[in-house]
Amino acid sequence: MATAGTTVYLWRPHGLVAYDLTTGLERLVITSPVGEDIPDNPATLPVAADVAGDRLVVSRPVASCRPMLLNLTSLSGLRDLPLTALGCTQVTGLRLSPSAGRLAVSYRTATGSRVAVLATEDGAVLADRAVDTGTTIALAWPDDRNLNGAAIHEPDAAKRTPFFLKTFRVTT
């Protein structure tokens, strides 16, 4: 799920819909991020997605490390933003900057968790850094240049470890 103003974008079995919070109406935006119907199976839904303005970015299960940037106005694909050269094995989160000019990606490599910032215009890597490996990595843009994040660790009763956060900031 992602939001833009009073519209919430939701994945349904038949594709991505725009749900208007004020009227309650749904409008089919695309049948799927790759041009085919999405089966009613959570394992085939996108790994991660985000919306900013008229841009949608989607990480698909079959190509997790190649997020696809789409234009919601023309319903066309703009470009792939590959992370394979960075050693990506799985994308775990995506967050477009407020202007949609940058994309923050949390991802896993063979050695741990990382966060990269890419330019959406050409896929150039603007920043890439290791982050504390957490159960979940949350990302937020307070503005177009700074990215805030937190590695969230769930408690482990067997190891007697508490719940904790480890925050970080990436400036591009």
Image (spheres, rainbow, N blue to C red):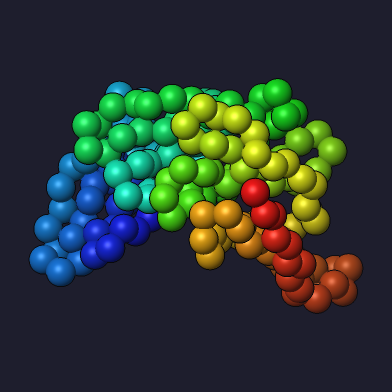
Q: Quadrant of residue 54?
A: top left
In percent of width and height, residue 69 lies at 42, 33
- In the picture, the quarter occupied by the N terminus is bottom left
Q: In the shown orientation, is residue 112 left or right of residue 10?
A: right
Q: Considering depth in this image, is 143 or 21 the residue closer to the camera?
A: 143
Instruction: Please determine whether, in this image, residue 36 is positioned above or below residue 106.
Output: above
In percent of width and height, residue 143 lies at 51, 61
Q: Quadrant of residue 146?
A: bottom right
Q: Is residue 48 visible?
A: no
Q: Quadrant of residue 111?
A: top right
Q: Residue sitting at 80 percent across and 56 percent down? A: 132
In percent of width and height, residue 89 lies at 69, 31
Q: Residue sitting at 62 percent across and 43 percent down? A: 117
Instruction: Please determine whether, in this image, residue 138 is positioned above or below residue 40.
Output: below
Q: Residue sitting at 53 percent across and 43 percent down? A: 103
Q: Residue sitting at 22 percent across and 38 percent down? A: 73
Q: Considering depth in this image, is 126 or 95 the residue closer to the camera?
A: 126
